[in-house]
């Protein structure tokens, strides 16, 4: 049973990755030729990410996941150091006013992705160690909230509100499942609403995104452009799509067609059947992940798998929701499918860790 769950999880991830490679080339080839005179530019870079991800996934599968709990604090300290370093001019790479990346020749590394994994590992280890003390405010609730708060501040300074919100939701769910008092979580949630309001409406581009989400047609050539073009792409595909490679929206109409809005191109070229197929694959992935979580041999494995599954699920839901116009634009890539460098690599590492936990699990 454990072997079949591992095979199923791995197979679904591989199918999603293969879909991603096909769609990245389809969505980016014309843009890549126009900008770099090489239609395979983004595909070749993505294949290097696949290779790096495959190596790290293999390592994650082979090294006992329980060792992560012993190094949880070390990983967290490394994540904090990287998050601070990326903010230093000349060290971190600045793109469009955001300083979120380290640049190493052909690859960019986003430390917030490593921080996501480090925080999830730390919180899973903390919950496993504390036992019933997790219900205590000072000894159970406050420490992980301090860690989350410090991580959130560093990520917000980049600035990256989408990643901060996603990580916060994952940690809240992990603590809720662990037995933390709902009153603590609810009180903190209420207290954070004014801060979230200020973070959104005091920053012009974030306020613009919310306004565009509420009424994209108020500024169809400006703030509402991405949402409108994404919906046009999805609507143009119909049931069966216009055909692989025949998207019109990727012809410089839809920005970030191979990254944040790749789901829209899938909808245009492969139609409703293609988008539903991708959603079904994610549902199958989540289903297998839940089986691994439920049959984890220890508490650390249970909460680690919960955090990893939640993060991948949340990114998928938000990305698809943004493409459909259900959520404001967030800038989170579609797991396994979007061209995304470090985000894609850490999603693959998450699969490796889940398979490692599955190997040690006890199945009926």
Image: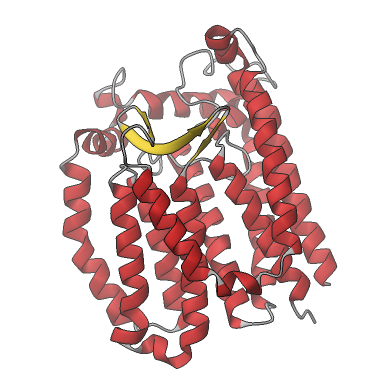
9 above or below 295? above
- Describe residue 112's horizontal placement relative to residue 145 as left or right: right
**Residue pushed farthest front?**
90
Comparing 50 with 29, the one in front is 50
Any part of residue 261 in sight? yes
The residue at the point 21 percent across, 60 percent down is: 193
Quarter of the picture containing the N terminus is bottom right
Residue 18 lies, in percent from the top left, at 73, 37
Residue 161 placement, left or right of 5: left
Q: Position of residue 5 (x, y in %)?
A: 78, 65
Task: Give the farthest residue toward the bottom.
Answer: 132
Quarter containing the C terminus: bottom right
Question: Which x, y percent locates residue 9?
Answer: 74, 57
Q: Nearer the viewer, residue 344 or 294?
A: 344
Residue 26 occupies quadrant: top right
Residue 64, image x, y percentages: 71, 70
Image-based side of 352 in relation to 127, left or right: right
Which color mode does the image show? secondary structure
Q: Residue at x 43, y 49 (%)?
A: 112
Between 272 and 99, which is closer to the camera in this rendering? 99
Give the residue drawn at x 29%, y 85%: 138
Q: Is residue 131 left or right of residue 268?
A: left
Q: Is residue 299 above or below residue 28?
A: below
* Number of numbered discs visible in the structure rendering: 0
What residue sits 34% from the left and 80% below the top? Answer: 141
Between 73 and 277, the one lying in front of the other is: 73
Q: Is residue 270 visible?
A: no
């Amino acid at each position: 049973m454990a072997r079949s769950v591992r095979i199923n999880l791995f197979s679904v991830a591989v199918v999603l990755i293969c879909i991603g490679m096909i769609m990245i080339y389809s969505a980016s080839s014309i843009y890549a030729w126009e900008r770099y005179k090489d239609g395979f530019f983004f595909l070749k870079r993505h294949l290097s990410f696949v290779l790096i991800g495959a190596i790290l996934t293999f390592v994650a599968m082979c090294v006992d996941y329980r060792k992560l709990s012993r190094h949880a604090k070390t990983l967290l300290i490394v994540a904090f150091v990287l998050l601070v370093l990326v903010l230093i001019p000349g060290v971190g790479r600045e793109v469009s006013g955001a300083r979120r990346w380290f640049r190493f020749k052909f690859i960019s590394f986003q430390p917030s992705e490593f921080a996501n994994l480090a925080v999830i590992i730390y919180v899973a280890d903390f919950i496993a160690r504390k036992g019933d003390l997790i219900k205590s405010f000072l000894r159970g609730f406050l420490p992980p909230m301090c860690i989350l708060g410090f991580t959130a501040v560093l990520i917000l300074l980049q600035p990256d509100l989408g990643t901060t919100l996603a990580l916060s939701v994952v940690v809240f769910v992990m603590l809720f499942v662990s037995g933390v008092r709902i009153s603590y979580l609810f009180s903190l949630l209420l207290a954070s609403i004014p801060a979230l309001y200020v973070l959104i409406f005091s920053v012009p581009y974030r306020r613009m995104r919310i306004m565009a989400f509420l009424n994209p047609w108020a500024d169809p050539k400006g703030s509402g452009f991405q949402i409108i073009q994404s919906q046009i792409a999805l609507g143009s595909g119909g049931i069966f799509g216009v055909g692989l490679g025949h998207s019109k929206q990727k012809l410089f109409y839809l920005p970030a067609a191979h990254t944040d809005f790749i789901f829209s191109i899938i909808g245009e070229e492969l139609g409703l059947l293609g988008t539903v197929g991708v959603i079904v694959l994610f549902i199958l992935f989540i289903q297998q992940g839940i089986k691994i979580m439920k049959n984890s041999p220890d508490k650390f494995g249970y909460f680690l798998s919960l955090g990893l599954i939640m993060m991948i699920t949340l990114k998928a839901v938000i990305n698809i929701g943004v493409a459909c116009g259900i959520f404001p634009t967030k800038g989170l890539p579609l797991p396994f499918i979007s061209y995304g460098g470090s985000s894609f690599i850490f999603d693959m590492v998450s699969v490796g860790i889940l398979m490692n936990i599955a190997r040690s699990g006890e199945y009926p």
